[in-house]
Image: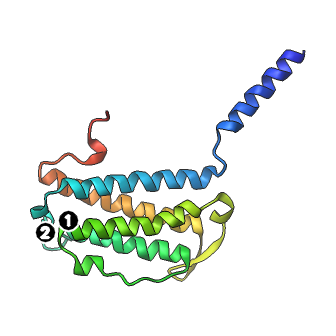
Amino acid sequence: MRIPVLLAAFVVSSVYAQAPANPLSSDVKAAWKSVNGFILKSAEKMPEEQYSFQPTPEVRTFGAILGHIADAHYLLCGAEKGEKRELVAEKTKTKKADLTAALQDSIAYCDASYDAMTDARAAEIVKFFGRDRTRLGVLQSNIAHDFEHYGNLVTYLRMKGLVPPSSERRQ
């Protein structure tokens, strides 16, 4: 009788030892890292001369999408932080190096929000476009926005004969 009880205690403690301390915010942070890895690799893959590529006049150029993503990071993570930043990347930057730097800076700005997130903090209410939202909900909106525009980048890359990062063969 004593061995099954000890075995059960070992199994339960092993399961809890493997679970992250903040499973909800850890999952969101993992999604954040994933999508931004794809976006940064897309920015690197597209040649400089294709940053002005625009499939139709009604849509953004490849570079403008990257600028828009960078600006949105400041808007969305700023809402989680209770801060407002000037959004200038999409309208002022056109060069690959400038847009990549703007994107990296905006990701670092958001990293602070994701790094500070705990499951307890995730449930706190903040204002988001005039509505009450949880901090985690705001950060999830940021990820959804990034994935939406990563889809645009994928299409642009494919139109130029490039394989998107998420489709590359895994090593």
Quadrant into which the C terminus falls:
top left
- Across and down, in percent, residue 74 comes to 42, 75
Q: Mark 2 points at which residue?
A: 52
Q: Label 1 near label 2: C-beta < 8 Å? A: yes
Q: Residues within 10 Å of mark 1 (few under 14, many from 20)?
A: many
Quadrant into which the N terminus falls:
top right
Q: In this view, does 6 lie above or below 57?
A: above
| Furthest residue in direction right, as rendered | 1
> Element under label 1?
helix
Q: How is the image coloured?
A: rainbow
| Image position of 122 (left or right of 130) | right
Q: What residue type is labelled 2?
A: Ser
Q: Which residue is drawn at 26% across and 76% down?
A: 90
- Across and down, in percent, residue 41 comes to 28, 53
Q: Is residue 72 above or below residue 83?
A: above
Q: Residue at x 55, y 60 (%)?
A: 115
Lower sequence index among marks 2 and 1:
2
| Image position of 147 (left or right of 77) | left
Q: Name the residue under label 1.
A: 62
